[in-house]
Image (spheres, grey):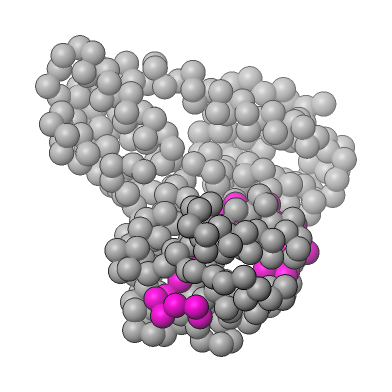
Amino acid sequence: MPPLLAGRTAELRRAERGLDDLDAGIAPSRSLLLYGPRGNGKTILAQEIVRQAEDRRFRTGVLPAAEFRDSASIASRLRRLGESQRTGVQAGPFGASFEPGSLSDDLAHLLQSWVGREPAPLVMFLDEVHILPADAARSFFGAIQHVGRESLPFWLIAAGTPDAPRRIRRAGTFNERQFAEVPIGRISRAETLRALEEPAAAAGRPMESRAAAQLAEWTRDYPFFIQLLGEAAWEAAGRDGLPTITTHAAAAARRTAEPEQRRFYKRRYDEAVDRGLSGVLRPLAEAIARNGGAMSEVALVDLLESITRDGLVAMDAVSLRNTLTDLGVLWERDVWVWEMGIPSFADFLLEGAPAGN
């Protein structure tokens, strides 16, 4: 958890309204889906919502999407959690108690029994929702919909990568209406500066405004890099025995953080190459750079169709866009506005990525 969760005021207020409804005995009308590229703090945001639910003495829990292979595995996991808690062995996060034989094999009834077992509302967090197989997602979300129809005090918070909304829709058309989709991307420059300056000042080592401005520019307002460079700047100032974080410390932080940033980029590059996109990345980066870091829907479609016509990839334009989204290379940050999932990834690609096959 970062020392300051900056740039998420609107999202937290939205979540607070849902928790207020639960407090008043009103079930939220839709589950909440936080989606966006890796490194933007979706899981941290969801954890903060869960923490606020715990402050209200709600029941909370975290579900393991990686274990949800099909309906049987979901039911088995939920049953094991219930049985372990009944015997006093803490193997799962839920606070409800269960008796032998009280859980139905039907997921909807199983979940309904869980939610209704105690009067306190239940808030569950399902991370990495994008990895759920379609059949498992269909079964689980169907059970969630059933609980929603019963107006029980329950709320599901899910988080996933940019392709999560599409994968959820593929699991069932009703799912699109079941989730309130909230994109989680970069934060504003003002919030980046706040995230850098306020924790440093609170901890007794203030950051000079010029140093904060330099660090903010280097992060491109990407939360993972804000944490990385902010921590490195704090440590650099400490090594030099400085009472403040200066531009000198900021420059040292950049040198320290650069190898980790480059490894981070290289992992994303290798993932794309493994999916057959080696000839796509550089033309995409060049187009993104020409357009100031973002592309319209029309410009992106034209580019992807040109790439497929030129034979740089063995798939059609729609499949190519879906694959780039799956990997988080691209994401739709706003309606018909596309950018790199990692904003400075294009710079890395232009420095050394091959031009084509």
Q: Quadrant of the N terminus?
A: top left
Magenta region: 116-140
Residue nearest the observer in this picture, 86 or 270: 86
Residue 318 visible here: yes
> Which residue is located at x 65 percent, y 79 percent?
109
Residue depicted at 49% across the width and 53% down the height: 90
Vertical comparison of 347 with 84: above or below: above
Q: Residue at x 84, y 49 (%)?
A: 316
Looking at the image, residue 249 sits to the left or right of residue 19; the answer is: left
Image spot of residue 267 (x, y percent):
63, 28
Does 275 lie within the magenta span?
A: no
Decide which of 83, 148 is in the foreground and name it. 83
Please state which of residues 270 and 90 is positioned toward the viewer in this rendering.
90
Would you say 250 lies left or right of 310 here? left
Question: Where 149 sits versus 294, above or below?
Answer: below
Residue at the bottom extreme?
Answer: 150
For the C terminus, the image quarter is top right
Q: Position of residue 121 (x, y in %)?
A: 42, 75
Residue 348 in sight here: no
Residue 136 colored in magenta in the image: yes
Residue 112 quadrant? bottom right
The outermost residue toward the top is: 240
Residue situated in front as seen by the camera: 278 or 163: 163
Residue 102 at x, y percent in the picture: 62, 76
- At 27% across and 33% down in the image, what residue appears? 213
How many numbered badges does the structure rendering display?
0
- Find residue 178 and report its image quarter: bottom right
> x%, y% of residue 335?
56, 63
User: Viewed as shown, does residue 46 lie left or right of 66?
Assistant: left
